[in-house]
Image: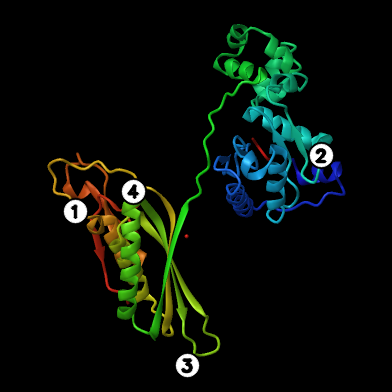
Amino acid sequence: MPLGSAHRLAPEALFLDPDPAADGAALKAALDRTAGFSPGVAAETDVAAPGFGRVEVQLDGLERLWGPEPLIVRRMGEALAWILPGPPLAGIGGTRFAAAAAAALAGSGAGSGSVPLHVVEPGADAAFLAPLPAAMLSRDPEVRARLARFGLRVVGQVAELPRSAVVARFGPEGERLHARARGEETDPFRPYTAPERLVLALPIDPPVSNVEGLRFVLHRLAAAFGDQLEARGAATARARLTLELDRSFSADDLPASMTIDQLLPEPTSEGLAIERLLIARLETAPPRAPVARVELELGEVAPAAGTQLSLFTPQTGRTGRLSWQLARLGLRFGEERVGWMELEDTEATLAEARWSWRRGMAPGGAGAATSATPPRRRSTP
């Protein structure tokens, strides 16, 4: 609603500008923390999605590790206290929908303890949901309006109807509405998997001040990572190189470290490809002081995707693919100095009308000719 209208409704409220990046970072931190309690954690990570802010945690079989379910939830709430602006609202139920409804009920004052919590007893999901408003069964305004037109005010009224009658009136969505109203699970649980990070570091004694010396150390780190990634069947999409500088004979304003963040042209498990890109960055902007320690971190590590290869065309290594060549050329000469050819009309009569020359990096890095000229970044809502 407009800010003026909101202020008239709640003049004592504090209004803050939206910060989607901060909200997303807070949720990811909360997911990482709750993952320490249960291997089954799920959440909507899109800030613009309606379900953003709700975290779902599987509690089955965790009693021997953390105690009774209410105690587990309260411990998770205490662990999240430093991440969230206030205590989370928690609900425990047999289905995802019942748990979310219980958490909403805890927020209305029905919860208890330092972490507002409402518990639905095992097997009592349908009885718990029966007196709640039927509008809770769907986020779709049209479905809610149709429920009201049919006189279905509470969830229990929907549960009492034959499923075939609900499906006849609401279509495929009616089956979901009826199952939810009867305390049945309707949505598959898809656990959240945090992107894995790999970190290795090596000290350098004595410190080195040239890129060739760093190349040897970086080669060892990248090769070790390449072996690990291949053994896991994984690939990385981002690399971060941190150089700790020896400032013994340098100016006081020199920073203690130098960090290079490099987004890779495509996820890879080849250490040589990562090493070449980072060396190209170092040649462009070498360290201003001798380097005493090198740390390499690989981020966004995930299972490697397969690639369909041609049966009759000889294949080149990943390091020889055009996208990697473009990345190195862009780092060396500047991205604005790399050009690519785009096919526009292959049926054009004149050959020169079939393609056009573009400046900048080619999309995807494939299918382009390049040219470079030298130089003059369950449910606890």
Residue that lies at the very extreme toward the front in this rendered image? 64
Q: How dense is the environment of label 4, judged by Cα within 10 Å: few (below 14), some, or many (20 and up)? A: some
Mark 1 to mark 4 CA distance (whole Å): 20 Å
Observer-side mark, 1 or 3, equals 3
Identify the secondary structure beneath mark 1. loop
Query: Is residue 359 in view from this perspective?
Result: no
Q: Which one is in front, 351 or 79?
A: 79
The total number of labels drawn is 4
Q: Label 4 sits on what residue type?
A: Gly
Rendered location of residue 152, percent (x, y)? 73, 14
Rendered location of residue 363, percent (x, y)? 34, 51
Q: Is residue 272 left or right of residue 257?
A: left
Q: Residue at x 36, y 50 (%)?
A: 234
Question: CB of mark 2 within 8 Å of CB of mark 4?
Answer: no
Q: Which residue is mark 3?
A: 249
**Mark 1 or 4, nearer chain start:** 4
**Mark 3 or 2, nearer chain start:** 2
Q: Residue at x 73, y 45 (%)?
A: 74
Q: Which residue is mark 4?
A: 233
Q: Which residue is mark 2?
A: 112
Identify the secondary structure beneath mark 3. loop
Q: Label 3 sits on what residue type?
A: Phe
Q: Which one is in front, 190 or 71?
A: 71
Query: Is residue 64 in view from this perspective?
Result: yes
